[in-house]
Amino acid sequence: MKMVSIFTMFMAAAICPAAHAGNTTTRDTIITMRVNTDDSLYNISSDTLALTDTTDNKECWAVKTNLLWDAMLAPNVEVEFPIDYKRRWTLMAEWWNPWYTWHHNSRAYQIQLFGAELRRWNHIPDRHHEIMTGSFWGVYAAWAKYDLEWNSHGNQGEVYSLGITAGWATRIAKHLHLELSASIGGFYNPLRHYHGMFDDTHLIWQRNDRIFYVGPTKLKVALVWMLPRPGKKKGGER
């Protein structure tokens, strides 16, 4: 009596990425083993399928504004973008520029600040975590110059600051995130006291001063506009 053994096995190979995580298309090789029960011949075939990479985020950089400074009539803008292929490390650059004088130049509200911050997000962007969301920490450096005057008595100076930041961000609309963060650190501020004369056409130096400070340095409630990678085709590659 002829004994016939019947086997059926299906085996799928692991994913073989065609490119780094920034691409939207991944090629998977599916290997199938089939058993012919009549003559016990084993046939192995392979097929390649193009699958959508759900870990890809079309949005990968951001433009922001700190709403707290906006409320103080201080225009400000920030730009943040990934600097590694996993998009877990990002670099943020910021600029503030309220530059007002009024009341015959006897009052001034002028600040120009440039800053940069290196951030590490606690989640790698994937199908469960969007880019630049969740918690993060970072280190920052900033420089500013200012002129603050009220009724012809004012101060001019520079600020040099270093510190660390912790924060959290979440999506609130299709292309909008909300970011909350706070920083602690220190700054050094050499400044000059002056008195304005002749309708504030001449600023008369009074004395120099220096301020050293350690403690809270920044507080942020930022509205974040997420943008796609420059040159990226809508819907990804086909």
Image (tube, helix red, strand yellow):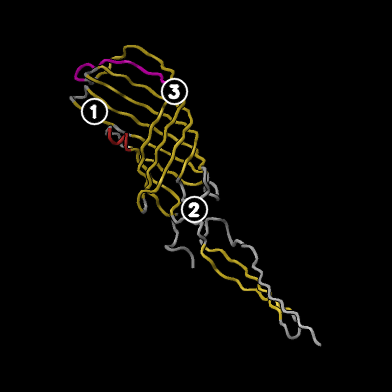
Q: Mark 1 — residue?
A: 101
How many residues crowd around disc 3 within 10 Å: few (fewer than 14), some, or many (20 or more)?
A: few
Nearest the camera: 221 or 2?
2
Q: Mark 2 — residue?
A: 128
Residues marked 1 and 3 touching at CB (< 8 Å): no
Instruction: Describe the element under mark 3 as helix, strand or loop.
Output: strand
Q: Nearer the viewer, mark 1 or mark 2?
A: 2
Q: Position of residue 41 (x, y in %)?
A: 75, 81
Q: Position of residue 140 (x, y in %)?
A: 47, 33
Looking at the rendered structure, the number of numbered marks drawn on it comes to 3
Instruction: Describe the element under mark 2 as helix, strand or loop.
Output: loop
* Alpha carbon separation for disc pair 3 and 2: 36 Å
* Alpha carbon separation for disc pair 1 and 2: 49 Å
> Is residue 188 on the magenta stretch?
yes
Kindly identify the amino acid type of the residue bearing the numbered disc 2: His
Q: Residue at x 80, y 86 (%)?
A: 2
> Is residue 192 on the magenta stretch?
yes
Instruction: Describe the element under mark 1 as helix, strand or loop.
Output: strand
Q: Is residue 222 above or below residue 21?
A: above
Q: Residue at x 42, y 29 (%)?
A: 143
Q: Is residue 225 above or below residue 211?
A: below
Q: Residue at x 81, y 88 (%)?
A: 1
Q: Is residue 201 left or right of residue 12?
A: left
Span highlighted in magenta in the image: 186-199
Please tell me whether the stretch drawn in magenta is mainly helix, strand or loop.
Answer: strand
Kindly identify the amino acid type of the residue bearing the numbered disc 3: Gly
Q: Mark 3 — residue?
A: 215
Mark before the other along the chain sequence, 1 or 2? 1
Label ID, residue 124:
none
How many residues crowd around disc 1 within 10 Å: few (fewer than 14), some, or many (20 or more)?
A: some
